[in-house]
Image (cartoon, rainbow, N blue to C red):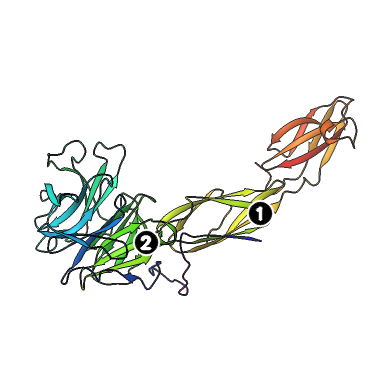
Amino acid sequence: MKKIILSTGLLFLFGILFGNDFPGQQPGTEIGGNLPNGYEPSGAVWHHGLQKLFLVNDNGMVTKMDADGSNVINWYVAGDLEGICIADSTSDFVYLGVEQPDYISEFNVVTGVVTRSFDLTPWMTGPSNLGLEALTFVPDSTNAEGGFFYAGLQYDGNIYVFELPIKTSSTSTTVTYVNTFTPVSGRWDISGLHFEASNETLYAIWDSSNKLRAMEVDCTNIMEWDLPGNDQEGITLWSGDSLAQNLLFIAEDVGKEVWKYDFNSELIITIINDGSVIFEPDPPGYYGSFVTLTAIPDDGNYFSEWSDDLTGSSNPETLLMDYDKNVTATFSYLNSPENVIINIVSDSVFIQWDAVPGATGYNVYSSTEPYSDPENWTLEIEETIETSWENPVSSENMFYYVSTINN
């Protein structure tokens, strides 16, 4: 028995998970201690280009700091800032979600200046303090602007999709409305959004219900968990190096708290008998992502079945990493056909045999001698999926055998 453990970080066990329990490492690490007094974090994004965490707060401040909360730099922009996202980590710009009136500001992190603003109020607006509350960018290589902005409205819980001229113009403030999604019917108070390109998953959080949901880009649900904290208004993920990989940051707008959690999913693969399993992507990555497993039998074997957290015999198979998973891949020896019957009548030969579990086909060979070297046998038919074969026979080749194959 072979066992493979796939993980991108340390393993922490805190008992058996039930229902929608938060799958990340607990307790988290609070990194907001160096923020100014009175700071209320309301949005977060990890800047892959600068390798920095950016935050915004309700009082118009943009903040940059390291993943451990050190080296804090603040800019005062003004406005009720509720979201922040990055469209291009190679540019100097981040985009700020502003509430009441609802708009998106383009902010230059080099000069510390807002360069332009995009008005969203024709499409999304809410009562006092129930406006734009979440913002992220979903890349799309086929789009002239590089992708779309997803803005969450606290009042109705909907996500509004917009195209902004961030690549085709440096001055235009035209907004193109694209679509509206309702992630959860009847649920309001959406408070944070993050699109993770590495697993093409949209993550959303809700403040009042303390929920974290992983979704497709059209907001189709993948999985939902209960968040461990309260007053949660910002979310971002970071895939770093070594043991720092796959971190989840949650910003809470009370007590200047920013929580960092290990968000690595872990997959343990146990192999029974002779074969191997390959997986894509490698390693599984964030919770809420999918991993595709392909079982590869050794010569003379076939893949039999999956068991534990994956069942059936489909190969390859896709597994949702909503929690840590254990998967067993069982391989079996590929037997030779049994109950082989060979009838030679006049100038014809008819052969039949029992089907062999795991066989994808059969080869039929003939020879002039029963115990000749295998290289001297003649291949009569290759990879037939039938369990019988009939063919004219010559007086020279009077001996036959059937072998199994598995491709």
Left or right position of 132 against 407: left
Residue type for callout 1: Phe
N-terminal of the pair, mark 1 or mark 2, is 2
Write down the residue under mark 1: 331
Between marks 1 and 2, how big is the CA–CA gap? 36 Å
Mark 1 or 2: in front is 2
Q: Classify mark 1: helix, strand or loop.
A: strand
10 Å neighbourhood of mark 1: few (<14), some, or many (≥20)?
A: many
From the viewer's side, name the closer residue of 99 and 355.
99
From the viewer's side, name the closer residue of 22 and 221.
22
Q: Classify mark 2: helix, strand or loop.
A: strand
Stretch of the chain drawn in magenta: 9-14
The numbered disc on residue 247 is: 2
The numbered disc on residue 205 is: none
| Residue 235 rendering spot, x and y as whole percentages | 28, 61
Total count of labels: 2
